[in-house]
Amino acid sequence: MSFTVAIVGRPNVGKSTLFNRLLEQRKAIVDDISGVTRDRQYGVTDWNGKTFNVIDTGGFVQGSEDVFEREIAKQVLVALEEANAIIFMVDAQTGLTDLDDSMAQLLRRSTKPVFLTVNKVDNNDRLLEASEFYSLGFDRIFFIAAASGSGTGELLDDISALISEDASAATKEIAALPKFAIIGQPNTGKSSLLNALVGEERTIVSDIAGTTRDTIHTHYNLFQKEFVLIDTAGIRRKAKVHEDLEFYSVIRAIKALDESDVCLLLLDAEKGITAQDLNIFSLAAKKGKGVVVLVNKWDLVQKETNTAKEYEAELKKRFAPFSDVPVLFISAKEKTRIFKAIEVALQVYENRQRKISTSSLNDIMLKAIQAYHPPVVRGNPIKIKFITQLPTATPSFAFFCNFPDDIKQPYKNYLENKLRENFELTGVPVRIFFRKK
């Protein structure tokens, strides 16, 4: 079992700042507005040679009327259940509050080790004032400044002392699993799909567009299948992005694309495919990611005999030239075909990892080139002599020939189609390069 540490506390004490510091990257959105972090976020970090998971949670507020604050409180409780150790964060600048007290009462009932961490202690006066937190009655107390990192070393030393070698190795293994990003426009049902797959409320779902702000990582391990699912914020057109926070969320969603191996692009069946969906699709293809297209809310569409067939043909026409993409019609709400979507995504992941031997490449592709020669250039016949696969993350092939700069796009498309016909590369962008022999 891997080892997990959860960071909890009331809003605005600096939980996400510490989370980013531990991960050494800006993964959680940080802002002075309280309630920026809504879902729990996962990251992996290491210290003293021990690898462990870190969970960042939203600010804990009790008895609130706000729909999001109630949901955040639920997410915090789930994080407490999942974690092996807890960093309870308070703020020296504001001092001890009622919310800190009620959070402390909740944590005292827990049998897990609690590290009381007093943040924003960046001078001696603050250190004196911070001594009031001893009254909360926790043994392990640390004074830190998350923004500058002072004091975090001692905290991490104590946490890593709890972690066994086995737990550290298990965490590393999970970090190496296939990663699937769920992407698409706001309100297409990305979080509903994630919750339906995992079978628990992993993310907050509402009809308000832009509910998900951060990218949420979920480790999936059911039915002999294991991978990491990444739910992202909806990506909308630049003109529609007004709020600063949403701007960051979009950047975060694009970074999640970079992290993932396969993208599950969600479309809304009723709206059909829009220009923005095509932008997201071509962005994923440009970054060399595998793509599976999921048409969600299919249960709401009026159907005739060939509706799905016609819909798929129309989609592929819009996706051209990269139209060798699996298209599935699903309903996250009714859980229709969602597990089929995962099987297809795992298949696309395998296709993306595919390594083709040089001998079979040359056997098959040289025959295809014999059958249809490249056009003659300035009276010179183009001769392709040898093909090899390049050692890259996305399937890429080098064709060695005498006039590499003179081969035009239509012939390149012909070669790509032949590669796809003969080797399983469905759902994966293929790169072709011509080199001087």
Image (tube, rainbow, N blue to C red):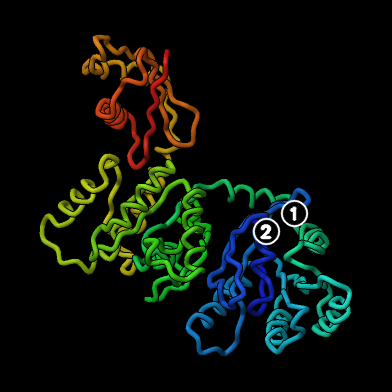
Q: Nearer the viewer, residue 387 or 250?
A: 250
Q: Nearer the viewer, residue 65 or 201?
A: 65
Residue hosting label 1 = 164
**Quarter of the N terminus within the rendering:** bottom right
Q: Quadrant of residue 362?
A: top left
> Label 2 near label 1: C-beta < 8 Å?
yes
- Left or right of residue 405, residue 274 in this image: left
Say which element carries label 1. Answer: loop
Residue flagged by tag 2: what amino acid is it? Answer: Phe
Tell me the distance, in whole angstroms, between the alpha carbons under discs 1 and 2: 8 Å
The residue under the point 39% across, 72% down is 209
**Quarter of the C terminus within the rendering:** top left
- Expressed as whole percent of the image width and height from the top left, the position of residue 284 reads 40, 47
- Expressed as whole percent of the image width and height from the top left, the position of residue 352 reads 42, 38
**Whether residue 226 is situated above or below residue 198 in the rendered picture:** above
Q: Residues within 10 Å of mark 2 (few under 14, many from 20)?
A: many
**Whether residue 132 is situated above or below residue 43 in the rendered picture:** below
Q: Quadrant of residue 320?
A: top left
**Whether residue 327 is situated above or below residue 129 in the rendered picture:** above
Residue flagged by tag 1: what amino acid is it? Answer: Ser
Residue hosting label 2 = 3
The residue under the point 61% across, 77% down is 59
The residue under the point 70% across, 77% down is 110
- Left or right of residue 73, residue 24 in this image: right
